Amino acid sequence: MERVKLTDVARAAGVHPGTASRALNPTTRDQVSRETSRRVLLAAQRLGYVPNTLARGLRTARSYVVGMVVPDITNPLFPPMVRGAEQVLSGAGYTLVLTDTDNDAATERRQVEQLRARGADGLIIATARWEDPLLDEIAASGTPTVLVNRYTASRRLPYVGGDERTGIRLAVDHLVEIGHRKIVYVAGPQDTSTGRERSAAFRQAVRSHGLPSPARLVSVANAYTEAAGAAATRKLLDTTVDFTAVMAGNDLIALGVLSVLGERGIRCPEQVSLVGFNDLPMFDKISPPLTTVRLPLGAIGGLAARTLLAEIEGTGDEDAVVQSLLGVELTLRGSTGPPPSD
Amino acid sequence: MERVKLTDVARAAGVHPGTASRALNPTTRDQVSRETSRRVLLAAQRLGYVPNTLARGLRTARSYVVGMVVPDITNPLFPPMVRGAEQVLSGAGYTLVLTDTDNDAATERRQVEQLRARGADGLIIATARWEDPLLDEIAASGTPTVLVNRYTASRRLPYVGGDERTGIRLAVDHLVEIGHRKIVYVAGPQDTSTGRERSAAFRQAVRSHGLPSPARLVSVANAYTEAAGAAATRKLLDTTVDFTAVMAGNDLIALGVLSVLGERGIRCPEQVSLVGFNDLPMFDKISPPLTTVRLPLGAIGGLAARTLLAEIEGTGDEDAVVQSLLGVELTLRGSTGPPPSD
DNA sequence: TGCAAGGACACAAACGATTGCGGTCACTGT
DNA sequence: ACAGTGACCGCAATCGTTTGTGTCCTTGCA
């Protein structure tokens, strides 16, 4: 089954390929008589013509491809974002190319190069580190790009994410409200914006409630994983501080906290309350169901895509959005309760 | 920053673009003197040349793109497969285009058309239904394609999956071994190969143990979701059959079973044991941790990609693999135990 | 009737790579 | 010395579109 090409359509309609092209393209259709364009459309329909995107891209220097770079698609944080982005992109006639860097900078560089070779019209990047030379290069190269989930120190690229500060504040407010005074924080890695932002927000929230300065009350996990969360929690438990609630840098870290509490025989929420961050799928099913801050992941992906499209197709005269934060909410579940009444 | 093209490299190396092309391509490099190819390689390196995939694809009718079609990337079944596939594809210089059909046939058709317009060299499809006209068309069109996770009645396309029959048998054997005699099955939708295959395997396993014919012991969920699993479980509980163990069509259905058991005050595993299928991430964290059949999802994705590549680049003289089944294992966790001693 | 204006279309040149074909040149064997 | 043989490389066509520049013909107006 030979692919039918523009020439075939043109021949069938009795016109020149150039004319057929104009007739098919809505924005140039008015350069062609109604009658002719009708014939061309009909012929295209009848022959089942579908334009060759490669040829078009070669000529127009537009690929209608956008690349999305995630560190690990297996991490439940990303599928909803990917999905949100994919839906708006494919709705706009774009194709999403997904690449999984496996958390490896070299792989990431290779992937991005691949994407540029493909002539990707834009990039959505979810792997930003606080200091990220690759992203600075991308920013310098002028390729339309938007960051999701994390941003960089240099802030040279637009960013779409959740309102993390508010999320942390809501969580801390809740803990304080039900009676907690001794709250510790198991932070995420500080080479990511989320790690820094949430840590800062935690310190600020604690201070605003007049609670003791949390210098010793923070332990940093070196990755957003259960294992790293567990390690950081052990460190915390091995110091002398005592506490009745722990705020985790994200849900996966919370998982680590939970497992360490379990192995030390500390009951949650009876003895220690726990709050996570992200509200990943399935975290309502674990035991105890995790109280956590819900981020609208799908919406973040979708908005990132829309922001990117605006930048790609942008007329340029309107001011570009540099940062968008979406609202978050606290989801109350079984992992938080009043502190033990000693 | 203008993209450097082949012409630039050629000029820098003082040769014709055609020669440069040959020098750059490993398979044609021997048509060029060592000295010349060295100069060309060096120039390419120095200028940071990265070939324009669109132009190459246009000329060679090869896009080095393969499309992967999944019903819902948010379903934890798929990310590991996607990841497995992506790793072998990008290792082979291919790019993975991911499309999420949102479980909608019309969307799927549109997406596949998009992919073919892009000149995708092949397709990996995870959305197969038992009767699937779109897939028959694809098979007829000759586009290299491999099915993962599910296959079609017509079996016209190669398939890579797990050894489901064995998985079910292992699970039933285990239940019988710890003393269960009254085992029911909450099946997945019967318009998928997995739904049918697993149901058949269940019947066969039960028969082989000399247990009563399971005609009334099977309830069919109309989707692989928690809600559908819950509905099917209620139907089962509202009949008069009693049972001490339930085998679920997959983990998500098992989730539905669990929630209905909870709402009826039936304790798992003390009163009823439960076995799932797939061993999705996080199902070791729920309460009780789910005993389930582990499918090597990443490996399935990877093997699908390799099978596809063989078909794409295939010399054609070797016999094509039509079906590959990967080994599965039973993961024992807290949701199964001996039946109550009445 | 003549002329300008402009609508509708055809022509052909791009886009950036690959590749069949053929030409040049050095070298070999007789 | 000359034909033959390869190795090496340049030339130009080609992939399927889009789009700038012509050309023709119709139309309107004086």
Image (tube, coloured by chain):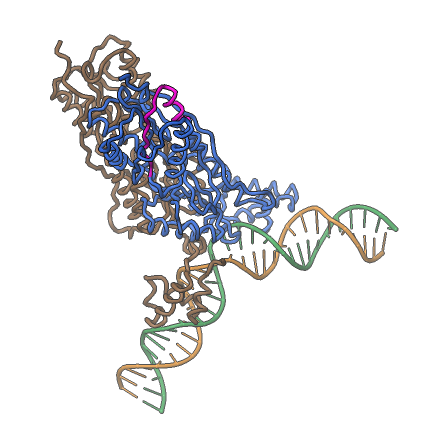
Chain colours: A brown, B blue, C green, D orange
Q: Is residue B78 magenta?
A: no
- Please state the horizontal and vertical placement of residue A215, each as a whole percent of the image: 23, 15
The quarter in which the C terminus of chain A is drawn is top left
- On screen, A226 above or below B55? above
For residue A95, side relative to residue A304 (left or right): right
- Please state the horizontal and vertical placement of residue B308, each as a whole percent of the image: 49, 42
Residue A156 visible in the snapshot = no
- Please state the horizontal and vertical placement of residue B12, each as a whole percent of the image: 55, 46
- On screen, B270 above or below A101? above
Residue A282 visible in the snapshot = yes
Seen at 26% across and 15% down, the residue is A261
Seen at 21% across and 37% down, the residue is A326
* Quadrant in the picture for residue B314: top right
* Quadrant in the picture for residue C2: bottom left
Considering depth in this image, is B30 or A186 the residue closer to the camera?
Answer: A186
Seen at 60% across and 49% down, the residue is B19
Considering depth in this image, is A273 or B209 the residue closer to the camera?
Answer: B209
